[in-house]
Amino acid sequence: MTEKNIKECQKSLDFVLGWFAKPIFIDGDYPESMRSNLSSLLPEFSEAEKKYIKGTADFFALSFGATLSFQLLDSHMKFQQLESISLRQLLYWISSEYNNPKIFIVENSWFVSGSTKRDDAKYIYYLKKFIMETLKAIRYDGVNVFGYTVWSLLDGFEWHRGYSIRRGLFYVDFQSHDKKLMPKSSVLFYQKLIEKNGFPPLPENQPIEGVFPCGFAWGIVDNYIQVSLVVKLTALQPNHCTRSY
């Protein structure tokens, strides 16, 4: 969290989102970081043109997901950047940076292995995380998100990844002649979520805090055991529980 790194992160977002968002939602002109780095390439706008450009979008349409070409880049071109699934952070940044615009998440998902069949628990995990982060951004951060769209309805051809990954709610059997479609577990999850309009305060949706009973057993399992190895662990727990192994 150095000043230099923060500026570089800002520049990265400026070149991806700010290129369009700042002219439309702020002042009709490109971000300052783009002006200073690409001054000879960017056109100059008159005050009349800036006024014309500003406010020309009804809402901020956000696409958030895996950049499938990210793995193709040489490591030195990534500038130590990593892919992140922190949708809430991005929503908050957009809200803070661009005067709290109305945001419509028009495309959001992650990917799972192409060998995944209809039981796509990992995809459900990603989907639930993204939607929960969207709800937190609305409820706790005051972000003005008014819609959410999952990508995608069907498994498909994913650019250079081909058919090696899947991102659909419906399983497509690419080996069959008629490309048979079958609903995955994620379809049922998303259907129920829409029916309830989110995560109502049911017992199974509530976080829990506390400690296990003093007599509760903890352990580690492995498929290799060396008889001469002796490990002693002492765990101190609340309520004066002291246990040795």
Image (cartoon, grey):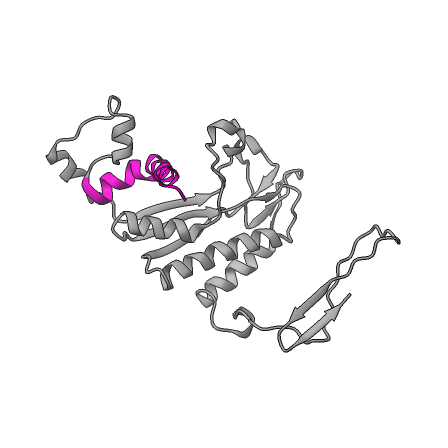
Q: Nearer the viewer, residue 48 or 91?
A: 91
Residues 171 and 159: in front is 159
Asked if 40 appears above or below 81 in the picture, the reply is: above
Residue found 23% across the figure and 39% down from its top: 23
Q: Which residues are magenta?
A: 1-27
Of helix, strand and loop, which mostly describes the magenta segment? helix
Residue 116 in the image: x percent, y percent? 65, 46
- The residue sitting at the left extreme is 48
Where is the C terminus found, in terms of image quarters?
Answer: bottom right
Q: Would you identify the image quadrant in which residue 230 lies?
A: bottom right
Q: Is residue 205 left or right of residue 8?
A: right
Q: Is residue 10 visible?
A: yes
- Outermost residue toward the top in this view: 40
Residue at 44% x, 57% y: name it: 133
Residue 168 coordinates in the image, percent (x, y): 54, 46
Give percent across and percent down for residue 205. Answer: 53, 69
Residue furthest toward the right?
227
Asked if residue 11 lies in the magenta stretch, the reply is yes
* Location of residue 38 by image quarter: top left
Which residue occupies the foreground of this view, 174 or 67? 67
* The image quarter in which residue 12 lies: top left
Q: In the rendered image of this protein, does residue 220 appear above or below residue 90?
A: below
